[in-house]
Amino acid sequence: MPIQKSYSLILSRLHCYFVEENEYDDVYLKFNGKKIWPDNKKQQPVMMDTTTELDVEIKDISRNQEVVIELWDWDLLSLNDKLGTFTMVIDGNSGPFSTDMTQNKKETTKAKYTIDWDII
Ligand SMILES: [Ca+2]
Ligand SMILES: [Ca+2]
């Protein structure tokens, strides 16, 4: 991959292998303290063994910059729970890539997710 000044990180798919709650999690993604997905609603329900298309672009990422994406579960009657984080680094290799979620063990015991991503 040619060396560029900055890159865009594309989140393409979210795989759910195990949900935290019964039947489904109401998930959304955050980056730098802001919700970045889904666009037009608070959360997206996902069930076990499913893949959800993402189509998120995060611009102006530099080489070797650590990008930490948070996966949250929305709750109606209690505080939302941070299920875990995906840590990605653009290291000069070409994608596509897959990154497993690091579980937030304070609030999560079951959730297992992976994100597919790429660089442009
Ligand atoms: Ca929930
Ligand atoms: Ca909660």
Image (spheres, grey):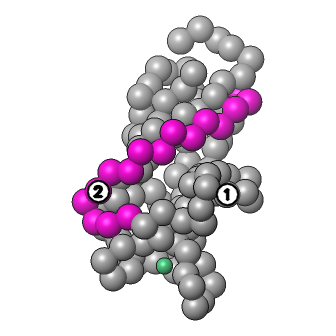
In the image, the segment drawn in magenta is: 46-63
Q: Which residue lies furthest to the bottom in this view?
A: 77
Residue at position x 32%, y 66% in the image: 47
Q: Magenta region's main secondary structure?
A: strand
Relative image position of residue 64 (x, y in whole percent): 65, 31
Relative image position of residue 114 (x, y in whole percent): 39, 51
Residue at position x 61%, y 36% in the image: 57
Q: What residue type is labelled 1?
A: Lys
Q: Quadrant of residue 43?
A: bottom right
The answer to whether any part of residue 3 appears in the image is yes
Relative image position of residue 14 (x, y in whole percent): 41, 50
Q: Name the residue under label 2.
A: 50
Does the magenta-highlighted stretch encompass residue 41?
A: no
Q: In this view, does 86 lie above or below 10?
A: below
Q: Which of marks 2 and 1 is nearer the N terminus?
A: 1
Relative image position of residue 51 (x, y in whole percent): 33, 51
| Spatial CA span between label 2 and label 1 | 22 Å
Residues at marks 2 and 1 touching, judged by CB atoms closer than 8 Å: no
8 or 41: nearer the viewer: 41
Tag shown at residue 35: 1
Q: In this view, does 6 lie to the left or right of 100?
A: right
